[in-house]
Amino acid sequence: MARINSSILAFRVAVAAEEGGDIEAILAAADAPQGIMHGNPPYADLATERRIWRAIVEAPGREDIGLGCGQRFPTQAMGILGYVCANAPTLHVAVEKSCEYARIMGDSMGGHIERGSRQTKVWIEQWTEWHDPLRYTVDCFVAANVAWASANAPRPVRPKEIGFHYTRPKD
C-alpha cells in the first residue's frame, strides 16, 4: 500500500496554519487521523494525503500553497535524505541523491536529473493514476529543490523553464 510519512503531512498543515488556516478544521475536513500532527500514525495512505491537500488549499484559499510548502521545506524533515543532501559535495549531487531516493522510496512519483553542458534538467515521473491534488506535491517538490539549491549556491538558482506533460486526468 502506498503511503507517506505523517511528519510531512503535519508540516504541510502547519504551513497552511501560518497562512491563516485552522489546524483542527483542516484535519476535520480531511477526515485525517487525530494524532497525525504528532506522528500517530507514523504513516498515512495516499488517499489521506489527497484529502489533506484539498483541505489545506481550501483553508487559506491559496492554490499556490504547494509552492509555499516547498519554499519552507526544511532538509531535516526528510530524515536521512536531508542529511545526505545537506552534506553532498555539490548541488548537483544533492539533487541527484534526492531523485535517487524518490525512485527507490516513492509510491506515486519520482524525480530524475540529467546534466547538460550549460544546464541541468530535473523532472518528475508519475507512476500511478493522476489525482488532481498531486499537483500540490509536484509544486512542493519543485519549489523545495529550487529553494534548497538557491540557499546553497554561490549565485541565485533560477528555473529556466517549468512545464507539464501528462495525460488528461480523470478527476
Image (tube, grey):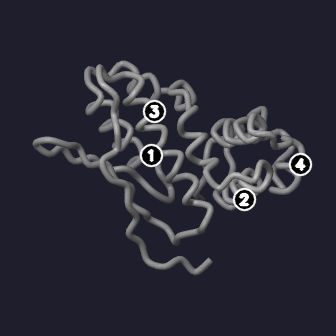
Could you tell me the amino acid type at mark 2?
A: Arg
Label 3 Cα neighbours within 10 Å, binned few <14 / some 14-19 / many ≥20? some
Q: Which residue is mark 1?
A: 142
Q: Nearer the viewer, residue 91 or 34?
A: 91
Q: Quadrant of the C terminus?
A: bottom right
Q: Which residue is mark 2?
A: 54
| Percent coordinates x, y for residue 103 in the rendering | 38, 50
For marks 1 and 3, give the CA distance.
9 Å
For marks 2 and 4, give the CA distance.
12 Å
For marks 2 and 3, give the CA distance.
24 Å
| Percent coordinates x, y for residue 73 in the rendering | 56, 33
Label 1 Cα neighbours within 10 Å, binned few <14 / some 14-19 / many ≥20? many
For marks 4 and 3, give the CA distance.
29 Å
> Can you tell which of label 2 and label 3 is closer to the viewer?
3
Hey, which quadrant is residue 165 in on the image?
A: bottom left
Q: Secondary structure at mark 2?
A: helix
Q: Residue at x 50, y 56 (%)?
A: 107
Q: Which residue is mark 3?
A: 147
Q: Which residue is mark 4?
A: 25
> Can you tell which of label 4 and label 3 is closer to the viewer?
3
- Determine contact: label 1, label 3, CB under 8 Å: no
Sequence-wise first label, 2 or 4? 4
| Percent coordinates x, y for residue 60 in the rendering | 77, 48
Sequence-wise first label, 4 or 1? 4
- Determine contact: label 2, label 3, CB under 8 Å: no
Could you tell me the amino acid type at mark 4?
A: Ala
